[in-house]
Image: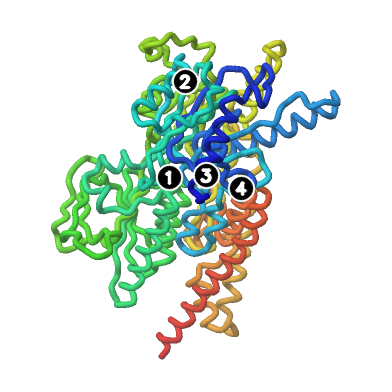
Amino acid sequence: MTFETFLFFLFNVLYTVTSFRPFFFPTNGHSQQRSHRILLSNTKVVTRSSSTLLLATLYDRCDVAIVGGGFGGLYTALALDRMAREAQQRTLLFSGQRRIPSLDIVLIDPSDQFVFLPLLYDLTMGTASTREVCPTYQDLLEGTNIRHVKASLKGFSSSSTTASNEEEEEEKGNGSISSLSSSLSDRPCSTFQLSPCDPKGADDTLFLSFDKAAVLSVGATPQSILQTVPGATDYTQPFYTQQHAMDTRDALFRLEQKVRRNHKPKVAVVGGGYGGVELAACLARRLPDAHISLLTRGPPMKGTRAESLVDRALSKLNVTIELVSVDTIEPIEPLIRHDKKYKGPVRIHRSDLLGNPIDTTSSTDKPWDVVFWTAGSTAADPVPHGLSELSMTSSGRLAVDDTLQCSWNTTQLSLSSTPVVVSTLPAIFALGDCAEILPTPRPNIPRTAQAAIQQAEVVAQNVLSTILDSTTGGSKKMNKSSFQFQDLGTVLNLGGPNGAVVGPQDTDSPLGPILIPLLDTARVGLSVADSVVAQILNAPTTNPTSKQLVERLGLSLGGYGLGVLDDDDDNNTSIGNKGTLSGTLSGITRRAIYSLRMPTNKQRVYASVSSFVSSVSALAKEASDEYQRNAREEN
């Protein structure tokens, strides 16, 4: 018997067993509830035992389906798994029997790895390891009741059509659904459509049924923003994903080669938000001999507590800030090269804030070697197109209430060929960049990882409440939690080992009255400590090389002039400094905070060790390079 014959035999045995599941595996009343289904395409299922589960490819079924493995999706899955286990233990402790069943949770994401986005800058610059920033779902989900299905969302539709009818129609079309369990044959279904992750694979499709609830956290994408600027898609380097970080690292390597040939590269960063500021600071630290410009429509991080700090930091790092609007980007010469990733040199056509074009033909406006794009993002597909049966906002995001539960588009449902009763439809929640709370809360919720992590706890609690309601038959109604964003402050990367800690922007934040005075006191104290260190370095007995090395590396307690008092400051209570702290200690604090915010305890320990080792190694390399540079200059 060949291996293929054995697999075919095993396939038929499993299909026969699952087709008569009620006979072989008697089910209780709970499992006979209506099942809602997710359509999978060419999926890869990673189980908690880190092996491929053949049964899952034939009959995929779960209690809760979570689409999107970013901060919102992954942290929701882990929180829900933790809360369900705790609820089981409480029930077992007080009643002596386990009434709450174990939850089978499926996390759907096209990638094998979770990406801790705030550390992409560190990964690019070599001060963080790949495992620290991009751990695999296999490692993160170990020991949980969560399975990872490698697929991406294509769309959603609700229907009263039975699964067997849909299977027959699909089987007549391409025969790709014939492996579904017939135990679904009498159940109405709602369907998520998932596209294959491997473009070379067959376009196989399966349904993953979910009995309890679903969560949407598909994030945001910059593609629609890039497409609004002619040339941006083809001639700029985006900076949003792990692959973008790797491409940026390659671009930096090419720029460093130009520096070695005594060429001063000209680099542009488009976008004045957190991403643009941090990337510009990291580039200036990595390429001190390059000309770095930040192109933005308004002052960087305008309206935030960090606005003044960022302006001072970028000025200290010799980053030029241009208040302009990017109109078009065009190459200087046809991009016919062996290295298709190289996207320069280019010319950036831009306008001032009044809409007047800026002359780019003058001899002073030299071509740009690389343009990095961090500006703007919109709700990710398929939110604008594939989820029409869920209510949308004017911005193309999913409309949710204060419990983060989606509402149904009754107008769209009425157009269905089969009657749909809204009360029988599943509970679907949404969070993160793809969701928008209506009515809009005040203050506005930022689209940051901090907000998504907080939303994940609320969604997990509300999903569990929905499940407990269904298990009690509605006899004991569980109250759902409302989401209220708590501003915990912000941390920034200011290049190398330096960073910034910024107090909460929201005056109603519970941490504001404590953290802001603490940061102000620390800033004043550390600025005094920096002045003492400066006196020691300026002492006649101090080696001039050591002094120059410390200055070039930008090491300080309070920020080497970033966010602390300069010589021309006449007071230390200016609004621009209030509630901020920057410097090397702030950079260490930033990495420590991110280590604590990692999704699992195991990852927290690894991130803590990795951040220390990677940072020290990178700093030692910089010190070695500076020492060699000083030696060459002396010779």
Indicate left or right for 172 with 523 as reference: left
Numbered disc in front, either 4 or 3: 3
Indicate left or right for 406 with 296 as reference: right
Residue behind mark 1: 301
Q: Is residue 458 visible?
A: yes
Q: Earlier in the sequence, mark 3 or mark 2?
A: 3
- Mark 3 to mark 2: distance in Å? 25 Å
Residue behind mark 3: 7
- In terms of secondary structure, where does tag 3 sit? helix
Amino acid type at image mark 1: Met
x, y percent for residue 629? 43, 81
Q: Earlier in the sequence, mark 1 or mark 4?
A: 4
Discs 3, 2 touching: Cβ within 8 Å: no
Residue behind mark 2: 164
- In terms of secondary structure, where does tag 4 sit? helix
x, y percent for residue 53? 58, 42
Numbered disc in front, either 3 or 2: 3
Q: Earlier in the sequence, mark 1 or mark 3?
A: 3
Amino acid type at image mark 3: Leu
Amino acid type at image mark 2: Ser
- In terms of secondary structure, where does tag 1 sit? loop
- Mark 2 to mark 4: distance in Å? 36 Å
* Residue at (67% x, 21% y) in the render: 27
Residue behind mark 4: 140
Amino acid type at image mark 4: Leu
Numbered disc in front, either 2 or 4: 2
Numbered disc in front, either 1 or 2: 2
Q: Earlier in the sequence, mark 4 or mark 3?
A: 3
In the rendered image, the quadrant that contains the C terminus is bottom left
Q: Relative to 615, does residue 44 appear above or below in the rendering?
A: above
Q: Dividing the picture into quarters, in which one does residue 398 lie? A: top left
